[in-house]
Amino acid sequence: MKNEIKKPPTESQTFAEYYESWLRIYKKGAVREVTFNKYQMTLLWVKRLIPNLVLRDLTRLNYQDLLNRYAECHEKQTTIDFHHQLKGAILDAVDDGLIDRDPTRKAIIKGRAPRSKKAKFLNQFELHKLLSALDLSASLNWGWFILLVAKTGMRFSEALVRPL
Protein backbone atom coordinates (compact mmCIF):
# COMPACT_ATOMS: atom_id res chain seq x y z
CA MET A 1 0.00 0.00 0.00
CA LYS A 2 1.26 3.44 -0.89
CA ASN A 3 0.53 6.41 1.32
CA GLU A 4 -1.17 8.35 -1.44
CA ILE A 5 -4.81 9.09 -2.12
CA LYS A 6 -6.10 6.74 -4.80
CA LYS A 7 -9.22 8.77 -5.53
CA PRO A 8 -11.29 11.33 -3.64
CA PRO A 9 -14.43 10.16 -1.86
CA THR A 10 -17.47 9.88 -4.09
CA GLU A 11 -21.19 10.02 -3.41
CA SER A 12 -21.44 6.24 -3.70
CA GLN A 13 -18.37 5.35 -1.61
CA THR A 14 -19.19 2.82 1.07
CA PHE A 15 -18.17 3.37 4.65
CA ALA A 16 -15.94 0.27 4.39
CA GLU A 17 -14.10 1.80 1.41
CA TYR A 18 -13.73 5.11 3.22
CA TYR A 19 -12.47 3.43 6.40
CA GLU A 20 -9.94 1.35 4.44
CA SER A 21 -8.63 4.48 2.72
CA TRP A 22 -8.55 6.36 6.05
CA LEU A 23 -6.48 3.57 7.59
CA ARG A 24 -3.98 3.67 4.75
CA ILE A 25 -3.63 7.45 4.88
CA TYR A 26 -3.76 8.20 8.63
CA LYS A 27 -2.77 5.04 10.48
CA LYS A 28 -0.34 3.06 8.30
CA GLY A 29 3.15 3.88 9.56
CA ALA A 30 1.78 6.14 12.32
CA VAL A 31 0.88 3.41 14.81
CA ARG A 32 2.64 0.21 15.84
CA GLU A 33 2.06 -2.79 13.62
CA VAL A 34 0.08 -4.61 16.31
CA THR A 35 -2.23 -1.59 16.63
CA PHE A 36 -2.61 -1.33 12.87
CA ASN A 37 -3.57 -5.01 12.78
CA LYS A 38 -6.38 -4.25 15.24
CA TYR A 39 -7.63 -1.51 12.92
CA GLN A 40 -7.49 -4.04 10.06
CA MET A 41 -9.61 -6.45 12.12
CA THR A 42 -12.13 -3.65 12.66
CA LEU A 43 -12.19 -3.14 8.89
CA LEU A 44 -12.97 -6.83 8.37
CA TRP A 45 -15.92 -6.56 10.76
CA VAL A 46 -17.18 -3.43 8.98
CA LYS A 47 -17.02 -5.27 5.66
CA ARG A 48 -18.86 -8.19 7.23
CA LEU A 49 -21.60 -6.24 9.04
CA ILE A 50 -22.25 -3.23 6.76
CA PRO A 51 -20.57 -3.99 3.43
CA ASN A 52 -22.90 -1.85 1.30
CA LEU A 53 -23.64 1.08 3.61
CA VAL A 54 -22.81 4.26 1.73
CA LEU A 55 -20.72 6.71 3.76
CA ARG A 56 -23.14 9.64 3.35
CA ASP A 57 -25.98 7.41 4.64
CA LEU A 58 -24.27 6.71 7.98
CA THR A 59 -26.70 7.81 10.72
CA ARG A 60 -26.90 7.45 14.47
CA LEU A 61 -29.48 4.72 14.00
CA ASN A 62 -27.50 2.50 11.63
CA TYR A 63 -24.26 3.18 13.55
CA GLN A 64 -25.95 2.02 16.77
CA ASP A 65 -27.22 -1.04 14.90
CA LEU A 66 -23.64 -1.76 13.79
CA LEU A 67 -22.41 -1.53 17.39
CA ASN A 68 -25.26 -3.73 18.64
CA ARG A 69 -24.58 -6.42 16.05
CA TYR A 70 -20.85 -6.36 16.83
CA ALA A 71 -21.59 -6.53 20.58
CA GLU A 72 -23.64 -9.72 20.16
CA CYS A 73 -20.46 -11.78 19.97
CA HIS A 74 -17.91 -9.56 21.73
CA GLU A 75 -17.23 -8.42 25.28
CA LYS A 76 -18.11 -4.85 26.21
CA GLN A 77 -14.46 -3.70 26.33
CA THR A 78 -13.83 -5.10 22.85
CA THR A 79 -16.93 -3.26 21.61
CA ILE A 80 -15.62 -0.03 23.17
CA ASP A 81 -12.33 -0.49 21.31
CA PHE A 82 -14.23 -1.16 18.05
CA HIS A 83 -16.25 2.03 18.60
CA HIS A 84 -13.15 4.14 19.26
CA GLN A 85 -11.39 2.86 16.16
CA LEU A 86 -14.38 3.72 13.99
CA LYS A 87 -15.05 7.05 15.68
CA GLY A 88 -11.71 8.54 14.60
CA ALA A 89 -12.48 7.94 10.93
CA ILE A 90 -16.08 9.07 11.28
CA LEU A 91 -15.15 12.35 12.97
CA ASP A 92 -12.68 13.03 10.14
CA ALA A 93 -15.49 12.37 7.64
CA VAL A 94 -17.68 14.88 9.51
CA ASP A 95 -14.84 17.43 9.56
CA ASP A 96 -14.36 16.94 5.80
CA GLY A 97 -18.08 17.47 5.13
CA LEU A 98 -18.65 13.91 3.92
CA ILE A 99 -21.21 13.28 6.69
CA ASP A 100 -23.51 16.02 8.00
CA ARG A 101 -23.58 15.01 11.68
CA ASP A 102 -21.58 12.85 14.06
CA PRO A 103 -23.38 9.47 14.12
CA THR A 104 -21.26 8.29 17.05
CA ARG A 105 -22.73 10.91 19.40
CA LYS A 106 -24.47 9.31 22.40
CA ALA A 107 -23.73 5.80 21.15
CA ILE A 108 -24.65 3.11 23.66
CA ILE A 109 -21.97 0.48 24.11
CA LYS A 110 -23.17 -3.03 24.84
CA GLY A 111 -21.42 -6.37 24.88
CA ARG A 112 -21.16 -9.72 26.49
CA ALA A 113 -20.10 -10.01 30.11
CA PRO A 114 -16.36 -10.60 30.46
CA ARG A 115 -15.45 -14.25 30.71
CA SER A 116 -13.42 -15.31 33.70
CA LYS A 117 -9.71 -14.96 33.09
CA LYS A 118 -7.07 -17.38 34.27
CA ALA A 119 -4.27 -16.03 36.41
CA LYS A 120 -1.16 -15.54 34.27
CA PHE A 121 1.36 -15.50 37.09
CA LEU A 122 2.68 -17.61 39.93
CA ASN A 123 2.08 -16.65 43.53
CA GLN A 124 5.10 -16.29 45.83
CA PHE A 125 4.87 -19.86 47.16
CA GLU A 126 4.61 -21.32 43.65
CA LEU A 127 7.59 -19.23 42.47
CA HIS A 128 9.82 -20.36 45.36
CA LYS A 129 8.83 -23.98 44.75
CA LEU A 130 9.68 -23.64 41.05
CA LEU A 131 13.02 -21.91 41.71
CA SER A 132 14.09 -24.56 44.22
CA ALA A 133 13.43 -27.29 41.63
CA LEU A 134 15.54 -25.70 38.87
CA ASP A 135 18.65 -27.46 37.55
CA LEU A 136 21.26 -24.71 37.69
CA SER A 137 24.23 -26.83 36.65
CA ALA A 138 27.35 -25.31 35.14
CA SER A 139 26.03 -25.50 31.56
CA LEU A 140 23.29 -23.24 30.25
CA ASN A 141 19.84 -24.84 30.20
CA TRP A 142 16.17 -23.91 30.53
CA GLY A 143 16.56 -23.62 34.30
CA TRP A 144 18.78 -20.59 33.81
CA PHE A 145 16.25 -19.12 31.42
CA ILE A 146 13.44 -19.53 33.97
CA LEU A 147 15.63 -17.97 36.67
CA LEU A 148 16.36 -14.99 34.40
CA VAL A 149 12.66 -14.41 33.72
CA ALA A 150 11.72 -14.85 37.39
CA LYS A 151 14.40 -12.53 38.76
CA THR A 152 14.11 -9.74 36.18
CA GLY A 153 10.34 -9.69 35.64
CA MET A 154 11.00 -9.90 31.94
CA ARG A 155 8.20 -11.22 29.77
CA PHE A 156 8.73 -14.72 28.45
CA SER A 157 8.61 -13.53 24.82
CA GLU A 158 11.10 -10.71 25.52
CA ALA A 159 13.57 -13.13 27.07
CA LEU A 160 13.37 -15.40 24.01
CA VAL A 161 14.37 -12.65 21.58
CA ARG A 162 17.97 -12.92 20.45
CA PRO A 163 19.99 -9.71 20.05
CA LEU A 164 21.01 -8.78 16.52
Image (cartoon, grey):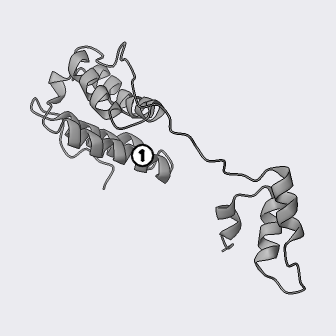
* Quadrant of the frame with the N terminus: bottom left
Residue 163 lies, in percent from the top left, at 69, 72
Residue 153 lies, in percent from the top left, at 79, 55
Q: Quadrant of residue 56?
A: top left
Left or right relative to 79: residue 54: left
| Disc 1: CA contacts within 10 A as few (<14), some (14-19) or many (>=20) | some
Name which residue lies at 70% across and 58% down: 155
The relative height of residue 45 versus residue 53 in the rendered view (above or below) is below
* Quadrant of the frame with the C terminus: bottom right
Q: Quadrant of residue 92?
A: top left
Q: Quadrant of residue 152?
A: bottom right
Residue type at mark 1: give it.
Lys
Left or right relative to 141: residue 39: left
Q: Nearer the viewer, residue 9 or 108?
A: 108
Name which residue lies at 19% across and 35% down: 50
Label 1 element class: helix
Residue 41 lies, in percent from the top left, at 35, 47
The relative height of residue 99 versus residue 140 in the rendered view (above or below) is above
Name which residue lies at 28% across and 46% down: 44
Q: Mark 1 highlights which residue?
A: 38
